[in-house]
Image (cartoon, rainbow, N blue to C red):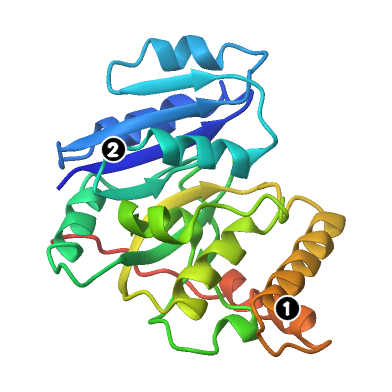
Amino acid sequence: MKISIITVCYNSAATIADTIASVASQQYSNREHIVVDGASQDNTMEIVKGAPSVTQYVSELDQGIYDAMNKGLKLATGDVVGLLNADDFYADDTVLDQVAEVFKDPDVQACYADLLYVDQSDTSRVIRYWKSRDFEAGLFKRGWMPAHPTFFVRRSVYESLGGFDLRFPRQADFELTMRFLEVHGIRSVYVPRVWIRMRVGGASNNSIRGVIKGNLEAYRACKLHGLNVGPLFIPRKVFSRLPQFFIKPHIDNTN
């Protein structure tokens, strides 16, 4: 089974080496690492071109992060696809082994796990713990979604159900996971382990204004797919994140 990892980036010279190294260090060898750059103005591409573990790369203007992800999906040749952002890295070197183990079941179409938000400069310092759960119908109406950087999907699912909807520039990951899990009911598996460490400061949560815009997009995505959500959807979605700041992770990724 071949696993494709897609990393999108823009002016990411400060962090992308960590991302590349975390993929290169994975024990699972049947993989490809695709980097889609948005025409960076710093030395991001010098780092990418100097990394022998990066199997494909492109650097050109795009319409934002999800447009870049769609480009990566078109380049992917693996049986399973995961996305790893340029300021994220895997929690340990067995993550892809764990992913491959899940997909040994031919009926499984997607899997996901837990994520740690960590400090920008001190990545050992945990800010939030995104502990997920098994999917059940109705969760998206309550503002739930799996941690998207941990979300691995068979490439055939993307081919049949489509990629990221650019009408949602901040919440296309919410819309896509909802479309796959809630609307089309693909079979997924939750793995209760930490797979990703994500540096804080993403596009959808880097300001109060960004949070509001993102949640309005999530509301519109629910309406688009016929989910019966009301005016309490947005506050419920916001408040559902609060426990992430107080729950302490028990990190044990040993096999």
- Displayed quadrant of residue 205: bottom right
The secondary element bearing badge 1 is classed as helix
Closest to the observer, 12 or 104: 104
Query: With respect to residue 147, does 63 lie above or below?
Result: above
Q: Can residue 101 be seen in this view?
A: yes
The alpha-carbon separation of the residues under discs 2 and 1 comes to: 33 Å
Residue displayed at 68% across by 77% down: 222
Q: How many labels does the image show?
A: 2
The secondary element bearing badge 2 is classed as loop
Q: In which quarter of the image is the C terminus?
A: bottom left
Q: Can residue 86 be seen in this view?
A: no
Kind of residue sitting beneath label 1: Lys
Residue 148 percent coordinates (x, y): 49, 59
Query: With respect to residue 77, does 230 lie above or below?
Result: below
Is 80 left, or right, of 211 in this rendering?
left
Kind of residue sitting beneath label 2: Thr
Residue displayed at 20% across by 72% down: 107
Closest to the observer, 189 or 63: 63
Query: Mark 2 packing: few (<14 Cα in 10 Å), some, or many (20+)?
Result: some
Q: Name the residue under label 2.
A: 77
Residue displayed at 46% across by 61% down: 161
Residue displayed at 71% across by 53% down: 170
Callout 2–callout 1 Cβ contact below 8 Å: no
Tell which circle, 2 or 1, labels the residue nearer the N-terminal end.
2
- Displayed quadrant of residue 219: bottom right
* Numbered badge on residue 116: none
Q: Name the residue under label 1.
A: 223
Residue 49 percent coordinates (x, y): 41, 11
